[in-house]
């Protein structure tokens, strides 16, 4: 009897506006990159199926707006996250300095049961810009910050060139899986649609 069970792993991407959160997500899920910048409004997500050790998982990746007016997205958005990805632009010191604010914001809103050991992954994006001559945040500085926060895994990425994106998200998926906060989804062979009084879907099953 074939199993139709899927495990949902919820990943949230946080970081300042313009650091490349949407581009990283699109590069990983769709293998596409657009030079046209369009700010994310509120939050959106993409899903991708990944397989580890003969088990199938659905990675639900939530992309968030970096603008201050969207920072208070509400507890429901953060709740149930299995991993949080913090993204900064290696060419912007401000975006790096704000990593701590984003980390604290997540821990406050998500209130994980074990905040000391909750899995974060940090991505230093846009390493391709100007051949690396414009970067202001060194890899050493970034790794030192990650080490000070409990040895957070760190990757330097280019969403545009696809550099380290696949590797980073493999690490993200594995860390989400290890967090132990898996939400099991069972897909029945038949679905009863006879109840007309169902609540309206918000597009989010989290």
Image (spheres, grey):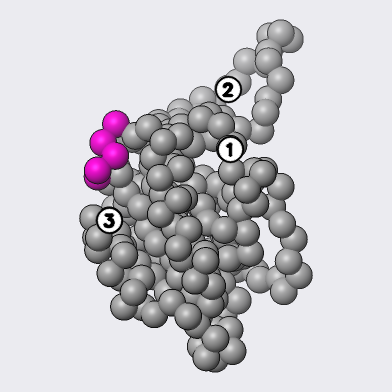
121 w.r.t. 1: above or below: below
On the image, which quarter does residue 37 sit in? bottom right
Residue beneath disc 2: 190
Q: State left or right for residue 60 relative to residue 175.
A: right
11 or 92: nearer the viewer = 92
Residue 89, label in figure: none
Q: Main secondary structure of the magenta part?
A: helix
Residue 169, quarter of picture:
bottom left
Q: Are marks 2 and 1 in contact (CB under 8 Å)?
A: no
Q: Is residue 168 above or below residue 70?
A: below
Disc 3 from disc 1: Cα separation = 23 Å
Reading the chain from its start, which is encountered first: label 3 or label 1? 1
Residue 17: x and y in percent read 62, 59
User: Within 10 angstroms of label 1, few (less than 14), some, or many (20 or more) residues?
Assistant: few
Q: CA distance from mark 2 to mark 3?
A: 46 Å
Q: Which residue is mark 3?
A: 149
Which contiguous range is marked in magenta?
A: 113-117
Residue 172 point in image, percent of width and height: 38, 56
Residue lying at 63% horizontally and 48% vertically, measured from the top left? 68
Q: Earlier in the sequence, mark 2 or mark 3?
A: 3
Q: Nearer the viewer, mark 2 or mark 1?
A: 1
Tell whether 196 sits left or right of 67.
right
Figure check: 35 above or below 181: below
The residues bearing labels 2 and 1 have C-alpha atoms spaced at a distance of 38 Å
The quadrant of the rendering that contains the N terminus is top left
Residue 206 visible to an observer of this rendering: no
Residue that mark 1 sits on: 72
* Residue 34: in magenta span: no
Look at the picture and state if 200 lies above or below 145: above
């Amino acid at each position: 009897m074939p199993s139709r069970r899927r495990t949902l792993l919820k990943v949230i991407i946080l970081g300042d506006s313009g650091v490349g959160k949407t581009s990283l997500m699109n590069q990983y899920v769709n293998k596409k990159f657009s030079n046209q910048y369009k700010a994310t409004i509120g939050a959106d997500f993409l899903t991708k199926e990944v397989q580890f050790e003969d088990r199938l998982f659905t990675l639900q990746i939530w992309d968030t707006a970096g603008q201050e007016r969207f920072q208070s997205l509400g507890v429901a958005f953060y709740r149930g996250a299995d991993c949080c990805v913090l993204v900064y632009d290696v060419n912007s010191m401000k975006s790096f300095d704000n990593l701590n604010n984003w980390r604290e914001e997540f821990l406050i809103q998500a209130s994980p049961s074990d905040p000391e050991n909750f899995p974060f992954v940090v991505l230093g994006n846009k390493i391709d810009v100007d051949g690396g001559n414009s970067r202001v945040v060194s890899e050493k500085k970034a790794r030192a910050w990650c080490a000070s926060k409990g040895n957070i895994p760190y990757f330097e990425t280019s969403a545009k060139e696809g550099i380290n994106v696949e590797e980073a998200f493999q690490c993200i998926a594995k860390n989400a899986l290890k967090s132990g906060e898996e939400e099991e989804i069972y897909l029945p062979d038949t679905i009863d649609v006879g109840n007309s009084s169902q609540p309206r879907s918000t597009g989010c099953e989290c």
